[in-house]
Image (cartoon, rainbow, N blue to C red):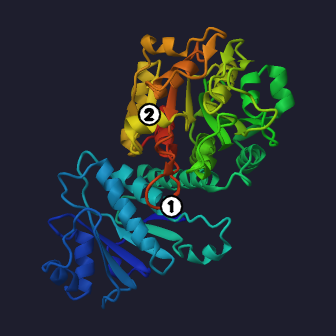
């Protein structure tokens, strides 16, 4: 997908497959839209006087043949009430427009953009969302469905008309394309079945990023190297699997060498059977999505490299397959961690925190400005927040505030839960320094409490994406969240956020 700014006083003469006219609820045509209406013999304004189009938020009306224009068709795009539109509603409108337009024939869509947005929707951010959603919604899973490749959209080019051709607007379109692409990378990895997307497949994808972008260097550790480092907790999860566990480090160098890096850590359980604490059979197929934290890291690192953000970022992935066998870790086993703390494994299905704790201890060597882990960690998160918000937990209030704001600004929202000392007693064990389970009460919080024991000495936040990583109603598939939130956070840290 390509997106560009194009200045023209006569959009009616622009040759394209689809020409989009945005309209608020008052249905007033902008100056550029008035030129199109005049060239069409006032057919558009005549239609707007009727009841065929109300300009409700996300409402789309396609006019296949309009005389007097070079465009093959006109699409009227409803934005609702101007004074009520906000970032969340604008994103919904962009999602509706892109979904509709991508289903139309043709390779070129032009969007008239000389409308005014209100203060809650900065114009360059609005442009970013147009590019983001056209890219995001162009994705169609077809890797294991060859017959579906013919269903891919023909749309290749978006022209944004009558927007000022300045650096801020150009940057916004570039950001939107990059974030949309990063989301789709995460979705593709999440959607792949567990027999394809193994830990070694993930490490191959991490290596590919290092080959594609000069600013990224990738290192992959195998089980022998992890054993030498003392990552017994991570390795214990993969004991029952024939697939070798992998540990990936992707270093993106966009800032000065002296700049402390932002570190993002992803849980990469490529299939989670629950191990000896076997999950119920119903919906176990969805446990291929248990590596969506890892997919988020790869998608985010790809996006920031595409944007060439002037910042240093290290993406880390701890990956294993959790299977039952004669070699598998058992409930009641006590294992060591890289940090030197022992862990009583009360339930082998609470494995995500076991791979993350070694990763979180490992990244201390990078002296991070902040570390954020992303994981499909707890079913309790879904009970608390449903499928709408990612759970955000942190021992650092300022970092939590920055991530919360990034969620609001990107419309990829999170909600903060507490980490109070009162919850820590739930993960005490009579046989080890920590237990890997805190009981049914406050499960999302006690999981974060467990992780907090491995984050001393740096700013840390935890994102539990169990409820948001994949669509659990309607069309099944990975969502690509929270790539957009993390990109927004990193763009803000680099001083490149659209505002």
In the rendered image, residue 64, in percent from the top left (x then y), is placed at 35, 86
| Percent position of residue 492, x then y | 45, 35
**Foreground residue, 46 or 340?**
340
- Of 207 and 46, nearer the camera is 207
Q: Is residue 325 left or right of residue 130?
A: right
* Left-right relation of 108 to 75: right
Asked if residue 124 is positioned above or below residue 226 in the image, the reply reads below
Callout 1 touching callout 2 (CB < 8 Å)? no
Identify the disc placed on residue 408: none
Real-space Cα separation, disc 1 to disc 2, in angstroms: 26 Å
Farthest residue to the bottom: give it: 67
Corner quadrant of residue 235: top right
Relative vertical location of residue 370 with respect to residue 91 in this rendering, above or below: above
Q: Tell me the quarter of the picture where residue 373 sits.
A: top right
Q: Please, what secondary structure does the residue beneath circle 1 have?
A: helix
If the image is split into quadrants, where does the C terminus sit?
top left
Q: Is residue 496 above or below residue 237?
A: below
Q: Is residue 337 visible?
A: no
Q: Residues within 10 Å of mark 2 (few under 14, many from 20)?
A: many
Choose the circle earlier in sequence order: 1 or 2.
1
Select label 1 or label 2 by which is in front.
2
Q: Where in the figure is residue 8, as x and y percent of width and height?
A: 36, 72
Label 1 sits on residue: 135
Q: Position of residue 472 (x, y in %)?
A: 47, 52
What residue is at 56 percent from the left and 36 percent from the top? 375
Is residue 176 visible to us here? yes
Residue nearest the observer in this picture, 416 or 286: 286
Kindly identify the residue that appears in the image at 51 percent across and 54 percent down.
Answer: 180
Residue designated by label 2: 391
The mark tally for this picture is: 2
On screen, residue 293 above or below 85: above
């Amino acid at each position: 997908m390509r997106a560009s700014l194009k200045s023209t006083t006569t959009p009616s003469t622009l040759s394209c497959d689809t020409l989009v006219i945005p309209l608020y609820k008052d249905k007033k045509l902008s100056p550029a839209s008035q030129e199109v209406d005049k060239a069409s013999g006032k057919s558009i304004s005549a239609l707007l006087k009727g009841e065929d189009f109300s300009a409700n938020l996300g409402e789309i009306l396609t006019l296949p043949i309009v005389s007097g224009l070079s465009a093959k068709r006109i699409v009227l795009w409803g934005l609702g009430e101007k004074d009520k539109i906000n970032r969340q509603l604008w994103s919904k409108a962009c999602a509706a427009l892109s979904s509709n337009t991508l289903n139309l024939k043709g390779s070129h869509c032009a969007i008239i953009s000389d409308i005014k947005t209100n203060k809650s929707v900065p114009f360059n951010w609005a442009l970013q969302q147009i590019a983001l959603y056209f890219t995001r919604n162009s994705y169609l899973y077809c890797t294991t469905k060859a017959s579906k490749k013919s269903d891919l959209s023909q749309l290749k080019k978006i022209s944004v008309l009558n927007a000022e051709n300045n650096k801020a607007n150009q940057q916004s379109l570039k950001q939107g394309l990059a974030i949309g692409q990063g989301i789709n990378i995460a979705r593709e990895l999440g959607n792949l079945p567990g027999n394809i997307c193994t830990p070694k497949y993930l490490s191959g994808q991490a290596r590919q990023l290092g080959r594609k972008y000069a600013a990224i260097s990738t290192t992959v550790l195998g089980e022998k190297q992890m054993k030498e480092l003392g990552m017994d907790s991570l390795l214990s999860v993969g004991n029952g699997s024939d697939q070798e566990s992998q540990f990936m480090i992707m270093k993106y160098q966009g800032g000065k060498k002296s700049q402390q890096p932002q570190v993002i850590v992803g849980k990469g359980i490529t299939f989670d059977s629950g191990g000896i604490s076997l999950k119920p059979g119903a919906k176990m197929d969805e446990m291929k999505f248990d590596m969506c934290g890892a997919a988020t890291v790869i998608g985010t690192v790809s996006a920031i490299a595409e944007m060439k953000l002037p910042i240093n970022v290290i993406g880390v992935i701890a990956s294993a397959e959790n299977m039952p066998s004669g070699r598998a870790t058992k409930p009641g086993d006590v294992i060591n961690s890289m940090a030197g703390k022992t862990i009583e494994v009360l339930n082998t299905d609470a494995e995500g925190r076991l791979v993350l704790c070694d990763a979180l201890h490992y990244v201390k060597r990078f002296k991070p400005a902040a570390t954020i882990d992303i994981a499909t960690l707890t079913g309790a998160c879904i009970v608390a927040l449903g499928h709408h918000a990612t759970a955000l937990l942190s021992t650092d209030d300022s970092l939590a505030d920055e991530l919360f704001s990034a969620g609001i600004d990107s419309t990829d929202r999170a909600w903060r839960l507490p980490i109070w000392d009162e919850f820590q007693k739930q993960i005490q064990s009579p046989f080890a320094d920590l237990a890997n389970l805190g009981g049914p009460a406050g499960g999302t919080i006690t999981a974060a409490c467990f992780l907090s024991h491995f984050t001393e000495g740096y700013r840390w936040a935890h994102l539990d994406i169990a409820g948001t990583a994949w669509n659990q109603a309607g069309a099944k598939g990975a969502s690509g969240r929270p790539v957009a939130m993390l990109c927004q956070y990193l763009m803000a840290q680099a001083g490149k956020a659209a505002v």
